[in-house]
Amino acid sequence: MTDTVDVLIIGSGASGAAVAWSLAETKMHIVCLEQGDWVNPASFPSNGRDWEARQWGDASQSPNRRQLPSDYPINDDNSPIKIMNFNAVGGSTILYHGHYPRFHPSDFRVRSLDGVADDWPIDYWALEPFYNENDRMMGVSGLAGDPAYPPKQPQMPPLPLGRGGAALGRAMNKLGWHWWPSDTTLATEDYDGRARCINLQHCPFGCAQGAKASTDMTYWPKAIRAGVELRPRCRVQEIVTREDGMASGVVYIDADGVRRFQAAEVVIVACNGIGTPRLLLNSKSGRFPDGLANSSGLVGKNLMLHPYASVHGYLPEPSDGHRGPAMCLWSQEFYETDAARGFVRGYTWQFGRGMGVISEVLAAMDTGQVPWGAGHHAAHRRIMGHRVGMGAICEDLPEEHNRVTLDDTLADSNGMPGAKVDYTLGENTKAMMAFSMERASEILTAAGATGIASQAPIRAGGWHWMGTARMGRDPERSVVNEWGRSHDVKNLFIVDGSLFVTCAGVNPTSTIQALALYVADQMKQRLATLFE
């Protein structure tokens, strides 16, 4: 047993890093345990010509394919969408695209506005100062004035649209539909010690240039300088509780494989929408037979995955291929509810400028654009560098049967049970995806594209995991309260995407981090009465 720390954070990704940095100003003894390790940017695929090949091996976004010691297995056989994540200092921000939208004000009020799901116990305006603070920490490139949002001011100019992005923008203009340069965490200017983007390769495989903001290079250096202790290669297996029901600390396996106990006054879980319910369910005891903090029975339930509908085609003129960031603009033309469409809520289109040569030809072979055998090379030459497309990020409604449980047939390298995902697409989601693909085909046709093809949902598209430890004021309908504290365990907090009540139609990382900063601020304001 080691000395008791004031605050113990589990997980060093998007939310764990943000909450660590924010709480550091209290001068409390703060320790973060991370099951992965620091990643050397020199090892990123974007340093080599084999960057595409490595996405099917050690740089895969799927833990089941990578099977690194820091990974844990995820049984997603009973889901049409396969789970992608990464365990390291910085977490999945190492591998994300850097696409960085905020939620809309309407996203916090879907029950009031549309009669579905539940309203959040907080609203956009409660998070707005933390969105702004997080934008400064991560460094956002974008263009002010987007009519889809309340006013906000990015730190840097937007990414260039490139040839493909400009063609899609012109097509949207023909249709009279909204589009805007994306907010991203890719630096277009030197920013806070990070070099600007120089269009190395696509971004999901780690940015060797350091232009893409991941929390190992934004929040963590500042948090460590402020006194936070970060221990990599330490896998937490169980949160332990005292007889009075309060958390006393955690059992973890250290970098040498030794089982240890770390005592703590406060425990903060930042393990993502899959890892957090996995840990809580594995922390069952006589007092908490159904898993820690689970008197509501909702730990692991209401999983939302953002089903993606993908549509692409081939322009007559060359696009940008694999050069530089994939995402350059978005459209929220169909974001808010219109009952005439046959579904509630909506989606965001992310527009892509192209993809790598290998990925492009494999996708073209799947859709018959490029044959095997005779004519293969000629067809490949015709389409190479001409592909453009878009993904519709469809809002997923919370349903209790979509859930994360422990898997009794799989275990990680330290013997802890893996996660099991049971997920089916809702009827509202299916209607939304079908609508989005029809409209996307209109955009590509207006751009002059041919060979238009679609896929929904993207099978390897489980990048976002939300809702499995939702926040709310009613202990029977939520896992934590309106500022992230467990209803059942008064010194246990959750700060990651599992808090989400609804998932909106945008990528969640910006909101995850704003929520983490919000929870930290609430904790700081209540230090004298934190457990009351």
Image (tube, rainbow, N blue to C red):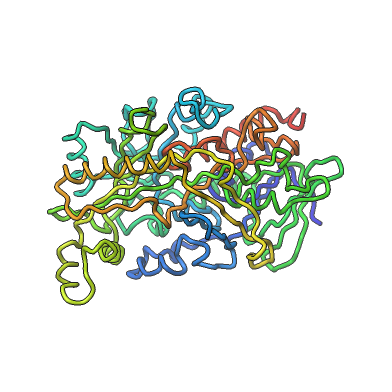
**Which of the image's four quarters has the C terminus?**
top right
Instruction: Name the residue at 34% across, 57% down.
Output: 202
Q: Residue furthest bottom?
A: 373
Residue 477 horizontal/vertical position (percent)? 65, 33
Residue 5 horizontal/vertical position (percent)? 75, 47
Q: Is residue 353 visible?
A: no
Instruction: Name the residue at 16% across, 67% down.
Output: 379
Q: From the viewer's perspective, is 275 left or right of 293?
A: left
Residue 150 horizontal/vertical position (percent)? 39, 25
Residue 374 horizontal/vertical position (percent)? 17, 76
Question: Which of 338 and 208 lies nearest the eye of the viewer?
Answer: 338
Q: Quadrant of residue 170?
A: top left
Question: Which of 85 and 266 lies nearest the eye of the viewer?
Answer: 85
Q: Residue furthest top?
A: 112
Above/below status of 2 relative to 168: below
Instruction: Name the residue at 76% across, 53% down.
Output: 262
Q: Residue furthest right?
A: 243
Above/below status of 141 relative to 217: above
Q: Quadrant of residue 294?
A: top right
Above/below status of 388 relative to 19: below
